[in-house]
Image (cartoon, grey):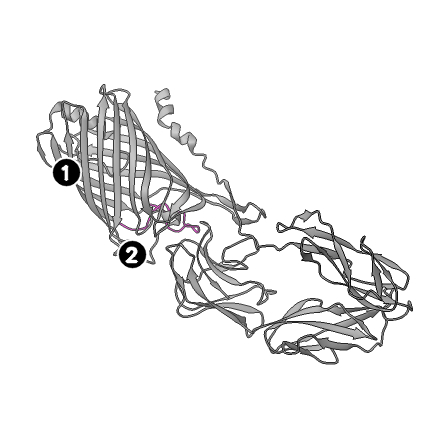
Amino acid sequence: MYPQRLLLLVLLLSLTLGDASAGPWTQKRGHGYYKFGFGFVRANRYYEPNGNRIAIPTLADYTFSLYGEHGFSDRITGVAYLPLLQRLTLNRQVGRETGAEFFEGAETTRIADADLGVRIGLFQIGNTVASASLMAGIPLGDTGHANGLYTGDGEFNQAISLGIGHSFYPAPAYVAVQAGINNRTKGFSDEFRFDAEAGYTIAQKLTFITRLRGLEPLRNGDDETQGGTGGLYGNNQRYLVYAFEMAAALSDHVGVSVSVEGATRGQNILSAPAYRAGVYLRR
Amino acid sequence: MSRKLFWTFAPAYLLVGCIGTDFLNETLDPLDPYILLTPLTEAIVIGETVAYEATYFDGSGVEAPAVFTWQVSDTTVARLGIDGIAAGLMPGQTRIVATAHGVQSDEALLTVVGDPNAVAQVEVSPADTSMTVGGNLQFLAIVRNVIDEPLAGRAVDWRSTDEAVATIDASGNVRGITPGSTTIIASVEGVDSAPATLTVLPPSRSGGFQPRPGTGYNVAGAAFLEPRPEGGLQLRFGDTFVSSNGPDLYVYLSSASSVNAGSLEVGALQSTRGAQTYVLPAGTAISDFDYVIIHCKPFNVTFGFARL
């Protein structure tokens, strides 16, 4: 059982987690939180598979999602990430000199691939906790769009990870690291994923977080498998991204968060800041 | 509660992501400065005049100011003033050119006749065309007097300026011998036609694919542009063709190594490896394009190309 004050801090921090790659802390039995999030990217640069950054027509991604954690017990937390609606647009392309239309533009609005799984608390030593997560990718998205505007990869992937978090209580700060393997199927390479983050809370209301997140493909897939346009649900992606996030507790049960994320390097991914905002309810 | 709901779903109001328009910097074919001279063929009677006009266009294809220098090849046939006005002196043919900024115009052919009913104009058809090695092509000559009245029953002498490239018989039938360029001229009673440019092409063209420089995508193998047994042309990739996979890959024919407004979209890439054939639209000539391009259409990214 976590000390009550530590739990309060963890709950405050957990509202900032915008997707299925949440931190190592588990929820108390019967408790949980639910977050409605919106994220968008508008990219006109792209990291090619060899890492070159090139100019591309503007590709925009608007995603509305639900993220939820529920404590089945003090050690076992159910985790779900459901992108309710992903809208993708690819701009029309017209020659500046001749006015010739090279591409008429494309769009799609679909449900996207979801993640379901559990997080299991392994141990707690003082203010340090460790947990393991097992997540399954549910291919609800579309992989048939003619112009490669995919909202999924069409495969059941399984990701297992280990995480360690440490609270500096009574100082309102924490650090956490996680690493794991994502086993992908249908020709996609498996992936090694890792992230590290640190947070600091001011006046028990406002939390600032910085995060570093990376992905390394194991390149054991089929080179013919490539995913969608611009690396959407792509194969052999590689990146190291950093993020800054700010979360504010509006009451004991409601809070909001905003974040921005950018890549320091990448392969087969868009090159543009990703912005996210969310509103959470917890009980 | 209604206030909370509003703010909870406020992001939904941002779901207005419409398709915008991106303007691409195009790779246009380089343009040499040139001078447009008119008329390119003219016939007058001795003592008459004809006014030539020249217009200079710069490397952007834009009309630009220029001071022209006029030249006439045979000053005994016609006199040419600095204002570009030529006067007929005696029967014969002469050529006129205008020069400015180091650029010379095409030659204008001026025929001067003494008798208004004499042969004054010989027009060759087709004017400029191409054919393949081993092929045959029929040329025709139209003969007129100085007032554009047709003159029938006149004997025509045909000649090719380079018979190693193409030969022409007495009836105007041309046979392509080797790849190259020549001009066809018809002569009637000492009056030449303006030269018609004839390009003789190889029966097929080929080239090896290479990745676009600097890209991580791979394209390799050979492309062949060749006649179809049924007529027309086809684009064929050899057995060793291979391309990196990508969304919505298309095959283009282009005059440059990138897709531009003048490029021909052949069709979606049939396969990222192995032999495949594409039938080209009717009217496509074997000399129209110099590059075969593998291009990701929605992302405007060229994976690789073959120069034919």
Residue A160 percent coordinates (x, y): 19, 45
Residue at the image position 25 percent from the left and 38 percent from the top: A212
Residue at the spot of label 1 = A131
Image spot of residue A176 (x, y percent): 18, 35
Q: Which mark is residue A187?
A: 2
Span of residues in magenta: A140-156
For badge 1, the amino acid type reads: Ser
Disc 1 crowd rating (10 Å Cα; few below 14, some 14-19, many 20+) is: many
Which element carries disc 2, helix, strand or loop? loop
Q: Is residue A154 magenta?
A: yes
Amino acid of disc 2: Gly
Q: Mark 2 lies on which chain?
A: A
Confirm or deny contact between disc 2 and disc 1 (CB under 8 A): no
Q: Does the magenta stretch include residue B61?
A: no
Residue at horizontal 38%, vertical 36%? A40
At a point 41% along the width and 62% down the height, the residue shown is: B271
In the image shown, does A81 or B306 lie closer to the viewer? Answer: B306
